[in-house]
Image (cartoon, coloured by chain):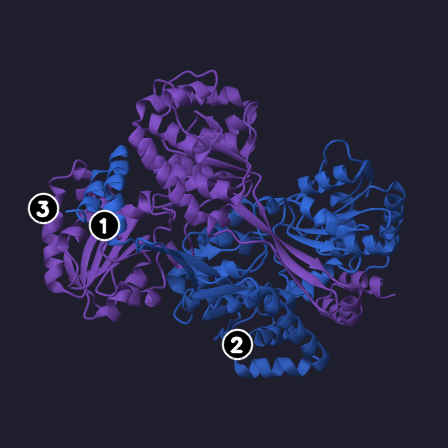
Chain colours: A blue, B purple
Amino acid sequence: MEILQIDGSLSLKRTVDGGTEEQRKAVQAIIAEVRAYGDQALRTFTEKFDSVALDEFLVTEDEISEAYKTVSSQLVDIITEAAANIRRYHEKQLRPSWMTTEENGTMLGQKVTPLDSVGVYVPGGTAAYPSSVLMNVIPAKTAGVERIVMVSPPGRDGKLPAGVLVTADIAGVKEIYKIGGAQAIAALAYGTETIKPIDKITGPGNIYVALAKREVFGDVAIDMIAGPSEIGILADETARANEIAADLLSQAEHDTRACAVFVTTSRALAEDVQNEVYKQLSQLPRKEIATQAIENFGAIYVAADMDEAVSAINQLAPEHLEIVTENPMELLGKIKHAGAIFLGRYSSEPVGDYFAGPNHVLPTNGTARFSSPLSVEDFQKKSSIILYSEKAMNDNGAKIAEFARLEGLEAHARAVEARLK
Amino acid sequence: MEILQIDGSLSLKRTVDGGTEEQRKAVQAIIAEVRAYGDQALRTFTEKFDSVALDEFLVTEDEISEAYKTVSSQLVDIITEAAANIRRYHEKQLRPSWMTTEENGTMLGQKVTPLDSVGVYVPGGTAAYPSSVLMNVIPAKTAGVERIVMVSPPGRDGKLPAGVLVTADIAGVKEIYKIGGAQAIAALAYGTETIKPIDKITGPGNIYVALAKREVFGDVAIDMIAGPSEIGILADETARANEIAADLLSQAEHDTRACAVFVTTSRALAEDVQNEVYKQLSQLPRKEIATQAIENFGAIYVAADMDEAVSAINQLAPEHLEIVTENPMELLGKIKHAGAIFLGRYSSEPVGDYFAGPNHVLPTNGTARFSSPLSVEDFQKKSSIILYSEKAMNDNGAKIAEFARLEGLEAHARAVEARLK
């Protein structure tokens, strides 16, 4: 992890795994099989990829009860409190339908409707994160989605992790299937004998899941395809090196391609952070993953002044941004591009991953330039409402017809004029 | 255009042109050329595809002034009034950043920021619709986007249509390039010597433009890929057959694959509308296009009662929906899926295409199930804001660390605990 002087702009390495042509073909074949053979194809692929023969995919109430026995009541309480915090934050995103009335009797508006049904993918193995269940399900639930379906690949014992099941239950999911991979995405998008299709798929997954989401995109909606996790930290000399280093490492432990960038106006702090990173790194259980991330995608930049530092952060457009300066709030207005902004020394990034309330599904790979955190709005859609009055038509019909004729659309003009006769 | 009885569900034909493998390869090659050779590639492709040799692509102020000379002042007034209506409607979509404060000192919120730059594609030839300029540019402008770039393919005379230039000027576009096709999309996404890249591309185009938007998607944002235009009309016996027929035809004249579906509880009205459609069709300048659309993608359905009719409309999820019943407002709550809803006999669909205010860029091909009209929000993005207080950290830090350890993310736990020491 080098210390570099910002020189006009950052030179930054980031990568997104787009998959190979071979992987794309494999995914297309799996989707075609599920569309043709339904549940039978799901059984075959589950046996092949998850090494378990399942007759039924639906998680039973007994399985949920079993799961509660292996999760401590303390953890259940923590997850329940986190769910409440996340729900409270997302409820603030709810916006009503609206309507305006004009004196001539015309009414215009916008009607907000929840999606009918949503599928949430939860990865298997070590990436089966309960927090991810909360962050995908609660906004959908808050939006008013009636049917929320969760899918996740079973272990070799034919079960889902207890933490995931308990969290799904706390979040209010009633329909969970033990299927994973591209076959699960196909089942959600096109349905099988036992699984009714849904309208939108969200949630992270491996490259096969990501490619399958791309394939079904258009027939159903999908959320963004996430790249590796990222953090940018902006600090002045008042920040503590051990805290900055710990937060950089909390991103780095996610993925060998995770990106951790520190930008500071203080060269002394830069050096202290560099030392702290290596000191803490050696003590981490996931130090092999974190080391690769830090060496390949980590960087420390020294800026001449705070304006140059802020400009570098805007160029980076990080998924997570921490501002650890004497007055972080005064910089907020200058930050243009970041998925989530953490202000001050107590706003350590994991606070947002689990507990504070805002969503942890955030735009990666610089897409914060044009994308937003997962929100209630991702589970709703709008319809425009137009009630044109007789007076409005009499006043404006001729103008509308003339505009239509400018575009050569005579039938448009006549449709309006039919009301003027 | 047959009359059918609804029998549980609609059987509906709709198609989206996904392009061929050959077209996709051609588009990839064009994009690669523009990335490698910049302006020179643009010149070559413009000569090849638009049959005109251009040295400069930027539209000059002189060209704008020239354009005003060929558009009547009456039309300028109509376009200006339409622009004002569209602006007024879209300003109502603006939502502020927000912040909540908790007693323990924590602040959570959401910051709304406009995109830095947007590119608007305007098709050439007969599809060079001034209304499309208004509908794409005004929401971006209202959102606060600083740089709006318009591109459109030049005619053989090296010019853009006067109506398009005047409308762009009225909408406030300052940067217009005479380039089109996949090469224009590549220039917007990746930049050339003279064109700085943008963050998002919106606007309709032919299959090459649509495929190019798919290719650059991810590097920049894009709006939806639109299918052929659609209308669904829901009416009871109080509606007038000539008006229904005229509105069905106003969609049908757009495209040979446009979809026009009429659903009614009155068999007598169904028959009258069928007769009116053929009567009016024979009088239309674009009757060949409209006839193909009506014969292949038009249908009249008779429903047993209004509930069955509404359910059919929700299944259709049409881009445009007209409700022409005695009390259209009382059905509004039952409509779940439609891009824009037109209420009552004076709300003829072309009113929304040009003048009323709501956007005419709407979800097609049943995607109203999960998509929304183009809006101000499509030109903004959000950042979550988290200011966690010292007290909140002291109260909750241990819980957050325990949640992190449940997921096997030790560095996350330690980052939080670094603040608790």
Is A136 placed above or below A315 here? below
Give the class, few, some or many, for how many residues have Cα within 10 Å of label 3's Cα (few <14, many ≥20): few
Q: Amino acid at mark 3?
A: Lys
Q: Nearer the viewer, mark 3 or mark 1?
A: 3
Give the class, few, some or many, for how many residues have Cα within 10 Å of label 1's Cα (few <14, many ≥20): many
Which one is nearer the viewer's eye here, A345 or B201?
A345
**Badges 3 and 1, same chain:** yes
- Tell me the CA gap for discs 3 and 1: 18 Å
Give the class, few, some or many, for how many residues have Cα within 10 Å of label 2's Cα (few <14, many ≥20): some
Q: Residue at x 57, y 29 (%)?
A: B196
- Tell me the CA gap for discs 3 and 2: 59 Å
Q: Amino acid at mark 2?
A: Val
Chain label for disc 1: B
Q: Which mark is residue B297?
A: 1
| Relative image position of residue B355 (x, y in whole percent) | 33, 44
**Mark 1: which secondary structure?**
helix
**Mark 3: which secondary structure?**
helix
Chain label for disc 2: A
| Relative image position of residue B29 (x, y in whole percent) | 47, 30
- Tell me the CA gap for discs 1 and 2: 43 Å
Residue linked to disc 3: B279
Residue linked to disc 2: A59
Query: Which residue extends farthest front?
Result: A103
Which one is nearer the viewer's eye here, B198 or A400?
A400
| Snapshot quadrant of residue B421 | bottom right
Q: Amino acid at mark 1?
A: Phe
